[in-house]
Image (spheres, rainbow, N blue to C red):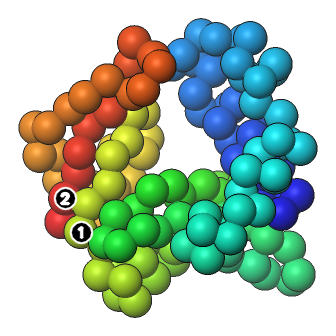
Amino acid sequence: MSRIAEILVFVKRMKYRSIFHNDAYSFGELQVIPVAEQYSNPEILENIWVYEEDEIVKGLIHIENNEVMELYVDYFFMGQGIGAELIEFAKKEYEVKFLWTLEKNHDAIKFYETHGFCRTGDRQLEEGTPEYIVKMER
């Protein structure tokens, strides 16, 4: 759990700080212990798969039904094909059809497009923020 939480916290800080500009959240509310407690909930945990290599968890994907809820790769292991393996696993084993991602997260949009997802035109505000998320389907 601590490794999953560590990945989530660190990557969210690295990728989202420039989008949300909310240090109070990034460095105040977003902390490893509360995230580990949240993700230790069996209802969430049973829908998370990790990428592990050399006994190190390097990434994770959270799938519910046919939706990718989250996909994160530890910042230090990005660019090594881990995200690609996780998304292809989700497509093959769980037949995922769609996901939502931040409209300003251009790296994520490009990554998902590379793996067969297309923007649908649907967008909505990310809860509690002024930022939009966009729906992508395959």
Q: Secondary structure at mark 1?
A: loop
Residue where numbered disc 2 is placed:
137
Q: Where does the image place residue 3, in percent across and percent down from the top left?
A: 84, 60
The answer to whether any part of residue 81 appears in the image is no
Which residue is farthest bottom?
93
Front in this rendered view, residue 79 or 17: 17
The answer to whether mark 2 and mark 1 are in CB contact below 8 A is: yes
What residue lies at 42% left-to-right and 26% top-to-bottom?
Answer: 127
Q: Secondary structure at mark 2?
A: strand
Using the image, determine if residue 125 lies above or below residue 115.
Answer: above
Front in this rendered view, residue 71 or 78: 71
Q: Give the quarter of the figure containing the N terminus.
A: bottom right
Residue where numbered disc 1 is placed:
97
Q: Earlier in the sequence, mark 2 or mark 1?
A: 1
The answer to whether any part of residue 97 appears in the image is yes
Tell me: 93 left or right of 31. Answer: left
- Quadrant for residue 135, please give it: top left
Q: Where does the image place residue 17, in percent across and percent down from the top left?
A: 63, 21
Q: Which label number is shown at residue 36?
A: none
What residue lies at 38% left-to-right and 19% top-to-bottom?
Answer: 131
